[in-house]
Amino acid sequence: MNLDLKSKPHTLISIALFGIFLTACSGRAAKSNGSDNVLTKVNIADSTQVHAKPADNKTILARREVPVLCYHQIRNNIASDSKRAHDDIISPDKFKDHIKMLADSGYHSILPPQLFNYLVYGAKLPQKPIMITFDDTDEDQFTTGAATLKKYGFKGVYFIMTVSIGRKGRINYMTKAQIKQLSDEGNTIASHTYDHKNFAQFNDDDWTKQIDEPTKKLEEITGKKVEYFAFPYGVFKSSALHKLKEHGFKAAFILSTARDENFPLFTVRRIIDPGRYTARNLYYSINKSFNKTKS
Ligand SMILES: [Zn+2]
């Protein structure tokens, strides 16, 4: 399997679990996007209990978007990198500089369960929330990415392409043990298909190969449920979004295109932090793309 997929943008999100529990009365069998007409018990970190009704799509779309950043390769450019690949490559020094800027600017990382509870139940988020996500399983996301996030008290979301786990070569990929460690340390491990097949081109068999089997593999590695998904290349097909919920996902992440009005939880926006950005560029980009009440 050719894994030279790195030059294309993908989707991801990370959310920080902030001690919010959610016990859905009807389990995971809900329809479409959290708009099920059931009362749900939400335990907030301070153990306050509220009974919240899931928000409808219009309410979800009207909530202020949380900035979500997407990273791929954290390494220095080499001569053979195509110009197009540059958006997906950020040097370790720049990455560290950008993450430091986020910390210095007062951002707090959140993880997908927090984002879900905020969007669906209006749960509170920390001040200046942000989600930091990584796509495609590259080992530098562990060695440089996770190590840098840890330094600033941030958690991340790792969208894993399961075919690549443990592979070594021109690009090295994370091992099972590294993925398990990320999970054990409180980061979110999420799905990015088996081998990066375009979601818009899924056939019936792909729901097993690209969705169910990777979920099972990641759940075996982490011992935790896998409930979040990022579309390869950020590309989705509206008519198939309902199936993600049927296959156990609570939310899915695109890139910076418009959300689907009928499935806002399954088209959460992210922006790429390209290697050419300065920390200041990133700061302005976050505010430009996300600081609106509505996208
Ligand atoms: Zn990807």
Image (cartoon, rainbow, N blue to C red):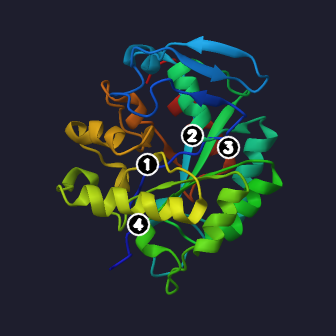
Q: Which image quadrant for residue 52? A: top right
Instruction: Name, please, the residue furthest toward the left.
Output: 203
Decide which of tag 2 and tag 3 comes sooner along the chain: 2
Residue type for callout 4 = Ser
Say which residue label 2 marks: 112
Numbered disc in front, either 1 or 4: 1
Residue 53 x %, y %: 50, 13
Say which residue label 4 marks: 7
Q: Secondary structure at mark 4?
A: loop
Q: Is residue 165 visible?
A: yes
In front of the other: 147 or 114: 114
Residue type for callout 3 = Arg
Disc 1 under 8 Å from ligand 1? The reply is no
In front of the other: 257 or 261: 261
Gap between marks 1 and 4 measured at Cα: 19 Å
How many C-alpha atoms fall within 10 Å of the one at disc 2: few (<14), some, or many (≥20)? Answer: many
In front of the other: 92 or 212: 212
Say which residue label 3 marks: 280
Up the image or down, 232 lies above or below 249; here it is: below
Decide which of tag 1 and tag 4 comes sooner along the chain: 4
The N terminus - image quarter: bottom left
Say which residue label 1 marks: 229
Q: Is residue 197 visible?
A: no
Numbered disc in front, either 2 or 3: 2
How many C-alpha atoms fall within 10 Å of the one at disc 1: few (<14), some, or many (≥20)? Answer: many
Q: Secondary structure at mark 1?
A: strand
Gap between marks 3 and 1 measured at Cα: 29 Å
Q: Which image quadrant for residue 76? A: bottom right
Gap between marks 2 and 3 measured at Cα: 26 Å
How many C-alpha atoms fall within 10 Å of the one at disc 3: few (<14), some, or many (≥20)? Answer: few
